[in-house]
Amino acid sequence: MKQEKLILWTLAAINFIHIVDFMILMPLGPQLMRVFDISPREFGLLVSSYTFSAGISSFFGAFFLDRFDRKTILLWVYVGFSIATLGCAISPSYPILLFARVISGLFGGLTSALILAIIGDVIPDSRRGRAMGLVMAAFSLASVLGVPMGLFLASLSDWHTPFYILTGLSIISLGMIVKFIPNITEHLGKEIIRPSPIEVVKRVTGNSNQMRAIALSVMMMFGQFMIIPFLSPYNVANVGFTEMQLTYIYMAGGAFTIFTSPWVGRLSDKYGKLKVFTIFMALNVIPIGIITHLGITPVLLVLVITTMFFVTSNGRYVPAAAIITGTARPENRGSFLSFNSAIQQMSAGLASLIAGIIIGETATGQLTNFNLVGYLAIFFSLLCIPLARRVKIVS
């Protein structure tokens, strides 16, 4: 059990750095749009470039992830991720930052799939919900500590600083991988003949249960990533927040989800993953509807709404991740989760790109049509509930 905990804490640390690296760009939106003089559409491209490249790498990763020791491949992927993060830190212009984000995404997408595959390999289903809750709590910690601290440091100096710090943390986490993650090779002996890429594609697309799980991932991403990238720019331009006050949103939301994420994991194991998912998904559409219609609003009221958004978003993801992971058997779990991660990342990128196209900007800098984006996000979120009921756990 001690070894299991060390593995989970290491995966949580990796997840924390990976999530902060992805998330930090979104609250930096107002500053980046001002410094580089870019439009909401160009900012949407900056966000989606990471997710599109993550999707592409995850897709091709499906062809080789199950061929290697999980520890070895994780080390190589994370070295590449660390170098790419340093590239973001030293970017002097919008085009170069865009390129650096593409490279970060290439390695980041594989990191996500590997984390889920390792949990699936070393944690039995009876404790998998709790394990997911612990590792996904990294999202909460990223929100309450990583992103606000990054924003604070960026406001004191400039937007480069958070990426320099993330590079240093990545080097530390590499040491944790070496020390605490064991060689995971059991999956290698379960299938003597390795499938070709075409066979991998056919195996996933030919499994209707796994395709329903992937469809669930797509709908969840559309329900969230039409909103999240523009949450900060909208609150600054339309709601009246300062760039420093944006840290309150992430601190409040993250502080609550640090406690609710493990709690949701325990609820999922006790009362059923589907039931808990349904409740949190239904609750999630309430703050989406309110957030996308706000005008000038007191800070405290906005924090209540955004905190509910973070808590319910995290609450629906914990059981959903456990459900989706459980649709694949150990011998092809890496392939399936890499495919799922690919589609998930591509969907997130497409969602933010579409939102960037829909959202306009007035002469005074206010954003328009965010309410229309909200209606679309609610529609896709509600579709997830009947879809999740059709996904069956097999392992």
Image: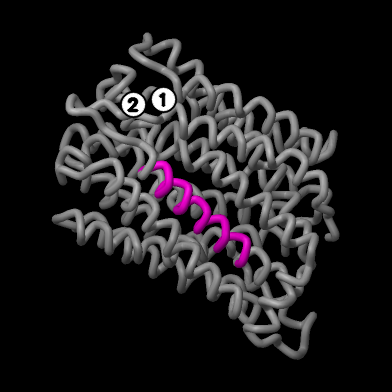
Which residue is located at x 20 percent, y 44 percent?
Answer: 38
Q: Mark 1: which amino acid?
A: Ile
Q: Mark 2: which amino acid?
A: Leu
Residue 245 left/right relative to 51: left
Give coordinates of residue 373: x percent, y percent.
47, 34
Q: Is residue 316 above or below residue 221?
A: above
Can I make out residue 272 in this image? Answer: yes
Which residue is located at x 63 percent, y 73 percent?
Answer: 183
**SS for callout 2:** helix
Dominant SS in magenta? helix
Quick check: marks 1 and 2 in contact, CB under 8 Å?
yes
Residue 109 left/right relative to 276: left
Classify residue 308 by image quadrant.
top right
Q: Which residue is mark 2?
A: 246
Which residue is located at x 66 percent, y 37 percent?
Answer: 316
Q: Nearer the viewer, residue 282 or 357?
A: 357
Which residue is located at x 38 percent, y 23 percent?
Answer: 248
Q: Residue furthest bottom?
A: 193
User: For the residues marked 1 and 2, what is the alpha-carbon distance in whole angstroms?
Assistant: 5 Å
**SS for callout 1:** helix
Give coordinates of residue 14: x percent, y percent.
49, 54
Q: Which residue is mark 1?
A: 249
Magenta stretch bounds: 339-356
